[in-house]
Amino acid sequence: MTDQTNAVVHTPRVFSGIQPSGHLTLGNYLGAIRRFVEMQESGIETIYCMVDLHAITVWQDPDALCHATRELAAGFIASGLDPKKSILFNQSQVSAHAQLGWVFNCVARMGWLNRMTQFKDKAGKNREAASVGLFAYPNLMAADILVYHATHVPVGEDQKQHLELTRDIAEKFNHDYKVDWFPITEPVIEGAATRVMSLRDGTKKMSKSDPSDMSRINLTDDADTIAKKIRKAKTDPEPLPDSIDGLEGRPEARNLVNIYAGLSGRKPEDVIDEFAGAQFGQFKPKLADLAVSVLSPINAEMNRLMADVAEIDRILGDGADRAAAIANPILERTFDIIGMVRSRQL
Ligand code: TYM
């Protein structure tokens, strides 16, 4: 379809992915999965992927990777993603991702990837020892999105730079081949908890890979563990302020208020109005009750789903078939644009 200026008009389509590396955290849930569910209910086509090819950019034990992929699928479904309404699958079952990823390795420039802060953080001081995949990772991420011509990508704040790169890749491809082919994707970074911080250090992101399990809440944690982690969360000695500005310079307090807001679907301002002047001794038990009330049913449902992995695998296989039916024609047309001889179907 084209508009009056002859530019391709892309139908709205949502894509996002999560790495099956370790357990899902509260950060993944509030920053990403809750948005995934909202978008599923908005009537737009939604495609959500367990990005196993991304996970192996750092070492993964094979059995643990397999388990984490199924557990992630169970977490998606238990959180409200419906495999009939959304397409749910694991990345390695749709080969078009890796194929377009290679094309984008040839579009993106070294200088662009050298600027990626996530690579710098993950590679640490010993960059020589990092895998090539870890460096090229954002190109594969761009391929994940653009192989579906996705227009909207719900993510947490930490993925913003990768989505800017995705736009740069789409623009360069369109420019180099003089086509209007790939859409310029919109990041969707919304809600009170787009950056959930560690419970041990309010200046660090809550992450699956933090060595301290006390720094995060996992979707697999039971009610007692969740309550204990919140009780022990780092705070400062002041009571909660009476306005949002009073959270300035108090990263741990801000984080707990944002988590409360994210879990209750309210604005941080409303949470502050309710708890102005409260000590953490009063606020933390309320937060723990709220977290348990939201997360425990998800945890129970995940356990139920994990009892039947054959059914999870069936759902992922069906999702992969539906995903490939969208991705393969887009990849074929991309190969035509580039000038690849094609004498058989993908
Ligand atoms: P990953 O697996 O690290 O995280 C998955 C999603 O969870 C969000 N997130 C957070 N949000 C708020 N606070 C936090 N502490 C927090 N931690 C994680 C992330 O922003 C993300 O939305 N590169 C991606 C996976 C990916 C992808 C894609 C995403 C691969 N291809 C295509 C979107 C589109 C990643 O490593 O996310």
Image (cartoon, rainbow, N blue to C red):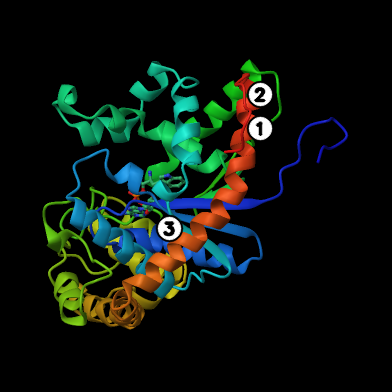
Q: Secondary structure at mark 1?
A: helix
Q: Are marks 3 and 1 in contact (CB under 8 Å)?
A: no
Q: Amino acid at mark 1?
A: Arg
Residue 96 in the image, given as x and y percentages of width and height: 50, 40
Residue 199's disc is none
Residue 296 in the image, given as x and y percentages of width and height: 30, 81
Residue 44 can be seen, yes or no = yes
Is 240 situated left or right of 262 in this image? left
Closer to the camera, 192 or 337? 337
Residue at 56% from the left image edge and 40% from the top image edge: 147
Q: Which residue carries the number 3 mark?
A: 32
Residue 155 can be seen, yes or no = no
Q: Secondary structure at mark 3?
A: helix
Q: Amino acid at mark 2?
A: Ile
Residue 199 in the image, given as x and y percentages of width and height: 20, 60
Residue 239 in the image, given as x and y percentages of width and height: 23, 69
Pointer 3 residue Cβ closer than 8 Å to ligand 1: yes
Q: Which of the 4 image quadrants contains residue 124?
A: top left
The image quadrant where one finds the C terminus is top right
- Mark 3, Cα crowd under 10 Å, few <14 / some 14-19 / many 20+, is many
Residue at 20% from the left image edge and 47% from the top image edge: 60
Q: Which residue carries the number 1 mark?
A: 333
- Mark 2, Cα crowd under 10 Å, few <14 / some 14-19 / many 20+, is some
The image quadrant where one finds the N terminus is top right
Residue at 28% from the left image edge and 83% from the top image edge: 289
